[in-house]
Amino acid sequence: CLEDLFWCSGNCNRTSNPRLLGFGPLTDGFGELESFSVEAIANDSYWFLHYFKDLSMLKFASNRSSLAVYLLTCAGFITSGASAGWGVVEATGAFQLPGGSTTTYVSAVGAANNPRIYGYNFGSVNTLTGQTLLLQNFYFENYAYNDGKENNNWLDGSSTATLNVLIQQDSTQISSTNYALQQTSTSGNNRFWNMATGTNTNLAAGLASAAYTVAFNVTYTYNIWNGSQSVGTESTGAYTGTFTILPVPGPGAFALVGLAGLVARRRKA
């Protein structure tokens, strides 16, 4: 819609953002539409449209003569994007990073003020000094409702959610662990979850010195009624970050340190 209707020349803002073209639900976590903005400059006028999921659509524009006009373009796209029958609002991990004592929240979906898990560097772990990389908890919010396409979708007490944590060294799988999530509260069609098992897991435990990737993926179920009842399964898709286990000096290195100290004492004597 945007590429067909708007031309951009000169300096275009937000060029570092991902493009809508090819932005898929499983690979990028494009679930419920939180907000959407359109900005364009044409014929000496500045146009702006913004949509928030919890508010009615805001449509306004301004130009140098302060003439207000409504920009209705792309409204159909925005409306359809916000009416999926199921999806994910938030998927956020709570971590204690190596050498730290506070909690850092890193998100795969939602919580726009948090850093993204995708490409996030969780730091370097010095196991010699007892450092760890803790997954303290994982918070998840999803929803399901009538999608207007003859399917009635809903979440209830039988719905499940499972966090998978996959650790790899290059292309070699080191571990793949599933952690059950538990429902903690409900708000309308939305359910809130956190970890029922595996809180305060040290992701660096038992790992040799190397660089690793760690991927987080939540799989969840919801109920479907389209003449008969069934269970649907969806996932956020895997979001991958990195961390490093620092090398541990071998016995020879400690021997050299001791020898250097002995030589220094003799010289002093």
Image (cartoon, rainbow, N blue to C red):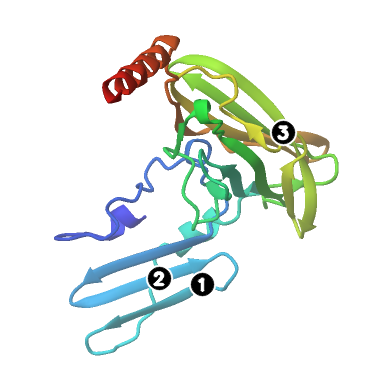
Q: How many marks?
A: 3
The reply to whether callout 2 and callout 1 are in contact (CB within 8 Å) is yes
**In the image shown, does 241 or 260 lie closer to the viewer?**
260
Tell which tag, 1 or 3, sits nearer the viewer: 3
Disc 1 secondary structure class: loop
Residue positioned 22% across, 59% down in the render: 12
Residue positioned 34% across, 86% down in the render: 68
The reply to whether callout 1 and callout 3 are in contact (CB within 8 Å) is no
Amino acid carrying label 1: it is Met
Distance from label 3 to label 2 (Cα)?
A: 44 Å
Q: Residues within 10 Å of mark 3 (few under 14, many from 20)?
A: some
Distance from label 1 to label 3 (Cα)?
A: 42 Å
Disc 3 secondary structure class: loop
What number is the disc on residue 49?
2
Q: Which residue is mark 3?
A: 198
Residue positioned 28% across, 67% down in the render: 40
Residue 13 as seen in the image, left or right of residue 94 = left
- Which image quarter: residue 13? bottom left
Q: Which residue is mark 1?
A: 57
Disc 2 secondary structure class: strand
What number is the disc on residue 162?
none
Residue 39 image point, x, y percent: 32, 67
Residue positioned 49% across, 41% down in the render: 117
Distance from label 2 to label 1 (Cα)?
A: 8 Å
User: Where is 129 relative to 138, above or below?
Assistant: above
Tell which tag, 3 or 2, sits nearer the viewer: 3
Residue 42 as seen in the image, left or right of residue 56 = left
Quadrant position of the C terminus in the picture: top left
Residue 120 image point, x, y percent: 44, 40
Q: Residues within 10 Å of mark 1 (few under 14, many from 20)?
A: some
Which of the two discs, 2 and 1, labels the residue nearer the N terminus? 2
